[in-house]
Image (cartoon, coloured by chain):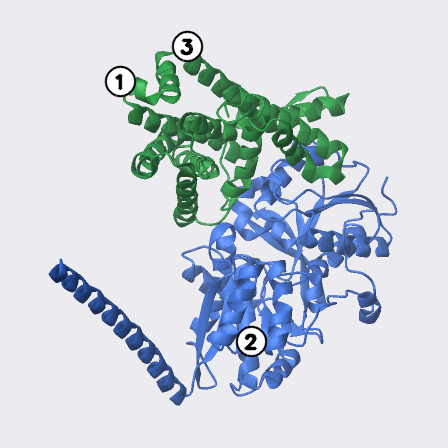
Amino acid sequence: MRSLGDRNLGKEINWQKIFIAIILLAFLTTFGFSQVAIAAKRPIKIGFIAPVAGGHAKLGMDMVAGFKMYLDEINYTVAGRKIELLVQDEQKPAVAVTTARKFIVHDKVDLIAGLLFTGSAYALIPVVTDQKTPLIVCIAAADDVTQRKHSKYVMRLSFGASEMSHIAGDYAYKELGWRKAVTVAWDRAWGHESAGGFHRAFEDAGGKVIQKIWPPPGSMDFGPFVANLDREADGLFDCITGGASIRFLRALRDTGHKWEVIGPGMITDETFFKALGDVGVGVYSVFPYSTALKTSENIKFQERGRKLRKGEDPPGFFSINYTAARFIIQAIESINGNVEDTDAFIKAMKSLKLQSLRGPLKLDKYGHPIQNQYIRRMEKVGGSYQNTVIKTYPMVTQFFKFDPEKYLKQPSYTRDYPSCKFCK
Amino acid sequence: MEFWVVQSFNGLSYAALLFLLGGGLTLIFGVMRVINIAQGSFFMVGGYVGYSIISLTGNFYLGILIACLALSLIGMIIERFSLRRLAGVNLRNMLATMGIALFLQDSSLLIWGGDPLSISVPNYLSGSVQIGNLYFPALRIFMILEAVLIFIVLMLVERKTRVGAIVRASIDNPETAEGLGIHVPLVRMGVFGLGALITAFGGVTGCAFMSIYPGLDFEMLVFAFVVVILGGMGSIPGAFIGAIIVGLMDNFGKALLPELSYFTVFAPMALMLAIRPMGLFGKG
């Protein structure tokens, strides 16, 4: 019995020793290597957070791919320093916060970019402000990120919910000739802000919003909602975005009534063309970009992008992120690669004016873009679909034509603000 | 009057979609006591497979057939190599199906990409039937017909055929059934495969209605559970009635009381759980 016990004991101690040795070795190696890295001129680190898995994976992957395309083109180098891009899944706001903290504290990134979800953007504002790390939002469109909750460290290179819908309201009244409109938008912040912006601008121009409908997020069947639409309206503002956009537009067609539709660019996103087909033809949208934008920059970009994407046109989110990467890198270059000086970097970002494939692009003092907004109409040209640009609203700000100070004193757009004075 | 007709029709077609989704779930639970989290995934993958076949051949019905065959195969493989080893412990089974759902979602992303896809339906299904000045989309009519067909077939098989008797025997008393020469593991595999098959059958048409995109699987899953909880886990008539209740209540609720949009689907379910937890026809 004793000899068996001795044999067993011998085996146990051996494993423990080996285990400890491995841990020590791993610890020493990482520590050792990091010491070596510090000795050389360390690379600029960018932490990129986007949903690369799960239901929104395609959008997240497009974001990353667009961002990377630019970095590839400059060989991951700026002002003599290498760039290191760390990508991590966004999943949901709580996870985004943890990831951001990891990026800042553990990976010591110089700035954080990306973000698809509204919730992530809002959640990260206090984190990056506290840690004094710049955050550049590359998609999330929630208004208050660069309005009532703005921070010096948070900038955005994408677009704002009401930024686009203000234009929609203005265009609908002045050019489409609508006098009465209905809005159909997701019953959450994105939908509220989008419909709110339309409502404000449309009534400011002289129109009347006579009905506002709020389908719950995740609605499968829009039958009950479209059957109830007030046909006295001249047109419909549509903020049903995501995969549901397709079945919403189909449900509209199925009512038998010809609806004129305008909404944010996502409702006829290029990635939906195949699935939408003719149902989308004639739908108007507002977006700071279109694959069909005829600037020489964009045409060349589309060619390069198509080669990368095996013949597929680079869509909206991809291109937005490409421009974002370019903007950030140019800002870094203008301060000679000295990203460690956060204040200088932020100043550079806010004073840069870029001629990009979207058109001219710069930031306002709240960190939000001032850029062209394009009115597009989905059309079938030569057998394939495109969002033809039919009008440009140059250098639009997030406050449209309203005074920023007064605008910020008003509440954010919600379900009940602006209130529906002409609703029945 | 028009309003009631249109909304009832919409409600019933929505009910059809829900039954096509919930039927498989209730069948699988009824026979195998497995809570199949991959139910939405079967629906979505069925749609994807149907999409591929239809794009290749242009034949809508061939797409449905191949989707059914493919999913029944997948279902049987899942049961044989994954669930069988978990010896019927409910929580383990549920978690296994959760893992499978995630696996199917990512595989679909790899195979079909992330952009939304549209299934081309035959011309006679893409328009609307006009009666008076009311429009009834043909695809919705087709969904109702499919749901009724599946319901009838399942009820007939369960009640009137030998296969149905074998299945019922395997549920009620597996030991005795085995003793009588019924190969119970084979029955279980077959039933899981069947559940996947009918989900795929509905999935192709359902996805033609909804369009297919990553994330559809989990969006639909919630509604499958609502239907089955209302109707009672394990009861096909229950799922049928449950789907009708949810479909009509949801439709009229959203049309008449849009402020209560969230409640119209989940309130009946919550009420049922409070008053009669096993559902209308539930086997507990």
Vertical order, A405 against A200 (above or below): below
Give the percent coordinates (x, y) of residue B64: 42, 28
What colour denotes chain B?
green
Query: Are discs 1 and 2 located on one and the same chain?
Result: no
Give the percent coordinates (x, y) of residue A127: 60, 71
- Badge 1 element: helix
Q: Chain of mark 3?
A: B
Q: Which residue is mark 1?
A: B179
Marks 1 and 3 sit apart, C-alpha to C-alpha, by 23 Å
Pointer 1 with pointer 3, Cβ within 8 A: no
Vertical order, B14 against A87 (above or below): above
Name the front one of labels 1 and 2: 1
The local crowd at label 2, few if under 14, some if 14 to 19, many if 20 or more residues have their Cα within 10 Å, is some
What colour denotes chain A?
blue
Give the percent coordinates (x, y) of residue B225: 54, 34
Residue B160 image label: 3
Q: Chain of mark 1?
A: B
Q: Chain of mark 2?
A: A
For the question of whether residue B145 can be seen, the reply is no
The local crowd at label 3, few if under 14, some if 14 to 19, many if 20 or more residues have their Cα within 10 Å, is few
Q: Which residue is mark 2?
A: A328
Look at label 1 and name its amino acid. Answer: Gly
Give the percent coordinates (x, y) of residue A1: 13, 57
Look at label 2 and name its amino acid. Answer: Ile
Taking the spot 63% from the left edge, 59% from the top edge, the residue there is A118
Q: Residue furthest top?
A: B160
